[in-house]
Amino acid sequence: MSALYNFFIFLLKWYFKIGRHFSPKLKLGYDGRLHWKQYLSEFKKNNPGKLIWFHCASLGEFEMARPVLDKLYEKKLENSTILISFFSPSGYEQRKKYDKVQGVVYLPLDTKSNAREFIELANPYLAVFVKYEFWQNILRELEKKKINALLINGLFRPGQWFFKPIGKEIRTVLATFDHIFLQNNLSQKLLQDAGIHQTTVTGDIRFDRVLAIKNEKHEFPELKAFLNSGFVLIAGSSWPIEESLLKKVSHKLGKKLKLILVPHDVSQAHLNSVESLFKGSSVYRFSKMNEDRNPDVVLVDSIGILSGLYSVSHMAFIGGGFTGALHNILEPAVYGIPVAFGSIYNKFPEAEYFIRNEIAYSINSSEDLLNVLNKFISNPELAESVKNKVQKVFKANAGGTDQIYHKIKGYYSF
């Protein structure tokens, strides 16, 4: 299996090398990895303390790790320094200037030589991986160097290849983690049945992150008239399929519905296409709003404010649910509002739980979305019921960050 894995890494190398000529994203990833050795050498000269190295695949995994990163920044462990590595440009490009850590770098492709040099240059005191990151050569190198590794916010499901005969070798790699922090009891049982017992169920630590966001101040004076004139539905990280459904629904509900549309893609070309789609409705870009304007649709043309906008909305419709890449539904739910999304959510246990408890709704068509909207528009008391359920869910699932922090802190007593 190791030979097959290394052949996969070889193919991945050529995928980047050839694909960079056709894909801007692949070019970013390829070019960003050209000088990682030089970066790590300079980083270690300037940051000689005990290194805690976090690896995140992309931006979503960074957001999972962020409560722990913020806690470490707040507590400032003596003589510690923090480095984050990313695999994907979507994570690196957005967080390369994250000011609560000392360094951010691309993870090189996991060849045996790269793994050996990365660990030698970085020389981490502790390595922390997030959710699904199992780079075999790197983990083996950490094991060889007797460097402790943690997995945080791990999530496993029956049927994954880890638990099939073909996954025997990756199970031995999972066993190299000093400790694995998991999102749910099912994940723990699956690992225990596979002979991996160094586990703790903390819940999804994104609960802690969104609770922290909720406690921040969110004010949008430029939306004053807009927010006071109807039922506000926010479309968070929407893709064209969600936007098409929203067009049909807004046409049927008319002035009853006020829409905040936050596309996943905020390029000028996509913003223009959304404006064309909603031709016939009054659409204003967020950057041009003021407190007196009251359009049918506010089109958000910047990034970084979505989580705050959930706080002023009555309901959220989250993108990615028609492709199996559902965006974060905890961010809107923390404000006690109902959430809707597409029907492909089986990889997201929080989505299944929310649906069972009528906090969230699975949508297959514009008719489904229309029915859910009418349900809450005509019966405001239902929103209060959702709010009460959400409060209980978040109370039950908060606190995982502290467990992980104390585990990390414990390594510093040696």
Image: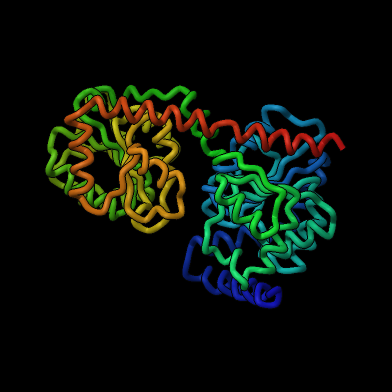
| Residue at horizontal 83 percent and vertical 60 percent from the top | 144
Q: Position of residue 32 (x, y in %)?
A: 62, 58
Q: Which of 116 and 197 is in front in this view?
A: 197
Please determine whether, in this image, residue 253 is positioned above or below residue 311. Answer: below
Which image quarter is the C terminus in?
Answer: top right
Picture layout, residue 219 above or below residue 234:
above
Q: In which quarter of the image is the N terminus?
A: bottom right
Q: In this view, does 44 lie to the left or right of 284?
A: right
Q: Position of residue 402 (x, y in %)?
A: 65, 32
Q: In this view, does 95 lie above or below 214?
A: below
* Residue at the spot 32% in from the left edge and 35% down from the top edge: 338
Residue 190 higher or lower than 167, as above or below: above
Res. 53 visible in picture: yes
| Residue 262 visible, this angle | no
In the picture, measured across the screen, residue 268 lies left or right of residue 32, that is left
Q: Nearer the viewer, residue 158 or 404?
A: 158
State the image quarter where residue 79 is shown. Answer: top right
Q: How was the colour assigned to the protein in this rendering?
A: rainbow
Q: Which residue is drawn at 21% across and 48% down?
A: 368
Of residues 97 and 387, which is closer to you in this image? 387
Left or right: residue 11 compared with residue 121: left
The residue sitting at the right extreme is 414
Residue 382 location (% of width, % of height): 26, 29
Please count the marks in the image: 0
Q: Where is residue 31 in the image (x, y as percent from the top left)?
A: 60, 62
Left or right, 178 with reference to 342: right
